[in-house]
């Protein structure tokens, strides 16, 4: 039995040997994601506790995603100048400061500036991490590495939401925890003896080409940015405004994330077998219906809200991946990094606009309008998908690239991890 156990351990070690060059980076990613997830929900809650008006809380979300857009262009410049490890260290330090200083200066202008800074640092960090993973992972194991990366992202996000119950939102304690986790993310990367990869080449973003290649994918990513950006920024306050605690807000966001994690692969499996536009239309329509349900449940029981939010995440968090897969079905595989960059840019633009618009609507009505707004956005995707299916014939399912989970909060270079990169070229269009 002892011999068999040793053999099993050796087999497992062999299976995961491909992770050795990036294990320190993955540990850093996990710590970073816990801190980022905690601060992402904490900041709007603290702003609400400070008495910030709803439009200002929405503007904080807009500032963050505006910074995210800046980071898309900043990361390649930074890495080419100082390399991966120094870039990672500098960006972690900026991210930590952007969180740590917030409770010290509860001034709207300072908070807006810090959110732009934090968004730019976050986007750049994900770009550094994902490019690093791609460069240090061989072709055979890119898909497995990408899957582990996404699992760690989800677990880290859920862990961060669960930490909201450790202290009162009105104290600086939770900000300290988030800052500490972001700073600790520096340690594994700083201590690793593995060499960092060579700087990446420039990624060109061709907006016109992306729109012409797939109007539904680009429009879908823009609308998903509007809806998901609003939800990420204002959902915690949506819960608090009903008299629930910060811990309830964390559970609410955990339901959203857990639903999104569980929905990716069933929806992706279906979309690999039928015209993806039908799947985009279907999940967008269901997301719109569930958004309306959330708006009608405003002021009701927390259990009902959380259950509905779980199913909302189950469908709404798959739309971005579906849109990316759809445009990849038609494009030259050599341009997939360019596609990922353009899709993230569309998402980030939508996410920077959505919170500002919906917060103004909420200020004139109630917080129930948050999910009425998302229902309109998802409804627009569904209607546009139907229109595109009328305009263009059905997508052939043969020889298409497989669905791959692509999280919109990550960086443009995520396509490098995409196992589709290893497939033969397919230059067919539809």
Image: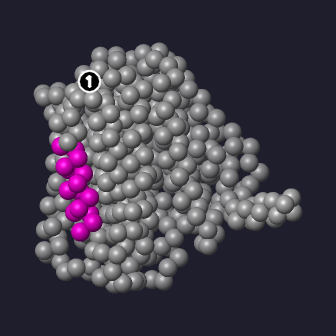
Residue to which mark 1 is pinned: 242
At numbered mark 1, what does the secondary structure look like: helix, strand or loop?
loop
Image point (54%, 59%), residue name:
147
Image point (27%, 66%), residue name:
279
Quarter of the N terminus within the rendering: bottom right
How far across and how far down the image is residue 123, in percent?
46, 47
**In front of the other: 150 or 215:** 150
Compared to 141, does 240 lie above or below?
A: above
* Coloration of the structure image: one colour
**In front of the other: 302 or 405:** 302
Outermost residue, front direction?
1
Residue 326: quadrant of the picture: bottom left
Q: Which range of residues does the magenta coloring cover?
A: 278-292
How far across and how far down the image is residue 289, in percent?
19, 49
Predominant secondary structure, magenta span: helix
**In front of the other: 303 or 244:** 303
Task: Decide if residue 238 is in sight here.
Answer: yes
How far across and how far down the image is residue 216, in percent?
23, 65
Image point (72%, 58%), residue name:
20
Task: Decide if residue 77 is in sight here.
Answer: no
């Amino acid at each position: 039995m002892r011999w068999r156990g040793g053999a099993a351990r050796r087999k497992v070690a062999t299976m995961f040997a491909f992770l050795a060059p990036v294990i320190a980076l993955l540990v850093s990613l996990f710590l970073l994601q816990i801190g980022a997830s905690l601060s992402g929900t904490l900041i709007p809650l603290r702003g609400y506790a400070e008495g910030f008006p709803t439009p200002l809380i929405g503007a904080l979300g807009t500032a963050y995603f505006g910074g995210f857009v800046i980071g898309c262009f900043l990361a390649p410049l930074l890495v080419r100048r100082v390399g991966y490890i120094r870039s990672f260290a500098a960006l972690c330090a900026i991210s930590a400061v952007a969180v740590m200083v917030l409770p010290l200066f509860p001034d709207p202008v300072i908070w807006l500036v810090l959110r732009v800074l934090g968004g730019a640092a976050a986007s750049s960090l994900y770009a550094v991490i994902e490019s690093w993973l791609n460069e240090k992972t061989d072709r055979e194991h890119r898909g497995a590495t990408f899957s582990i990366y996404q699992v760690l992202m989800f677990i880290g996000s859920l862990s961060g939401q669960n930490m909201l119950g450790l202290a009162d939102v009105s104290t600086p304690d939770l900000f300290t925890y988030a800052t500490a986790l972001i700073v600790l993310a520096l340690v594994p990367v700083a201590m690793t003896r593995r060499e960092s990869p060579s700087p990446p080449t420039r990624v060109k973003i061709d907006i016109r080409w992306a729109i012409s290649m797939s109007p539904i994918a680009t429009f879908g990513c823009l609308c998903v940015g509007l809806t998901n950006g609003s939800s990420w920024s204002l959902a915690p306050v949506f819960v608090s405004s009903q008299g629930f605690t910060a811990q309830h807000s964390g559970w609410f966001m955990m339901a959203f994330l857990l639903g999104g994690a569980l929905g990716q692969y069933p929806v992706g499996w279906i979309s690999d077998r039928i015209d993806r536009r039908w799947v985009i239309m279907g999940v967008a329509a269901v997301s719109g219906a569930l958004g309306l349900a959330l708006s009608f449940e405003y002021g009701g029981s927390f259990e009902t809200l959380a259950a509905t939010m779980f199913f909302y995440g189950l469908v709404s968090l798959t739309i971005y991946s579906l849109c990316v897969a759809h445009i990849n079905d038609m494009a030259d595989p050599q341009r997939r990094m360019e596609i990922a960059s353009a899709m993230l840019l569309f998402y980030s633009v939508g996410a920077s606009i959505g919170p500002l618009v919906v917060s103004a609507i909420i200020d004139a009505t109630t917080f129930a309008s948050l999910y009425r707004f998302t229902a309109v956005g998802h409804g627009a995707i569904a209607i546009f998908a139907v229109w595109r299916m009328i305009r263009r014939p059905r997508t052939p399912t043969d020889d298409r690239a497989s669905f791959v989970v692509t999280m919109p909060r990550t960086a443009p270079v995520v396509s490098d991890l995409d196992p589709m990169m290893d497939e033969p070229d397919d230059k067919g269009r539809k």
